[in-house]
Image (cartoon, helix red, strand yellow):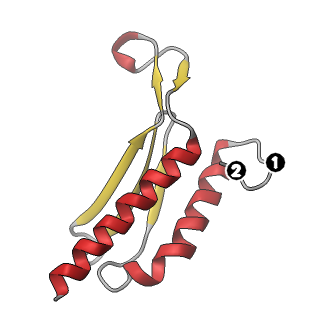
Amino acid sequence: MPDDPLVDSWRDVMRQLDHRLVRDYLSRVRRFGRGVGVWGNSTTVGVDVPLGGRIGPMWGHEVRYAKRTGPLGLFGSRIIIKDLDAVEAELRQALDEWLTEQDARQR
């Protein structure tokens, strides 16, 4: 998923994903929400769209790209179960579907 082959940290990957999604979706999302935010942890990546004021409803979608092998799935080594390119494609699909829904509600 990284655009730059020199990217070696998870933060860099998340920043790049955030940059691409904001660049591609912010103008469309702003018609219905306040922005687009990407977050991630060691097993999940998600996108959120705040719909209200500073505190209020949000729409979001998350994708699990890895799992832990230890007790309760909280510890142990991480096993990648989904390529990060597939994660980005799924987040984009979810955003597109949400935007289509919002457009339909406006009519």
CB atoms of marks 1 and 2 within 8 Å: yes
Q: Can residue 71 be seen in the rendering of this structure?
A: yes
Image height of 37 relative to 61, above or below: below
Q: Residues within 10 Å of mark 1 (few under 14, many from 20)?
A: few
* Residue type indicated by callout 2: Pro
- How far across and down, in percent of the image, does residue 84 sit? 57, 43
Image height of 51 relative to 73, above or below: below
- How far across and down, in percent of the image, does residue 52 sit? 24, 76
Q: Which residue appears at 50% of the width and 14% of the height?
A: 76
* Residue type indicated by callout 1: Pro
> Which quadrant of the figure has residue 50?
bottom left
Quadrant, the C terminus = bottom left
Q: Which residue is mark 2?
A: 2
SS class, disc 2: loop
Q: Which residue is mark 1?
A: 5
Q: Name the foreground residue: 12 vs 106.
A: 106
Which label number is shown at residue 50?
none
Q: Which residue appears at 45% of the width and 24% of the height?
A: 67
Q: Residues within 10 Å of mark 2 (few under 14, many from 20)?
A: some
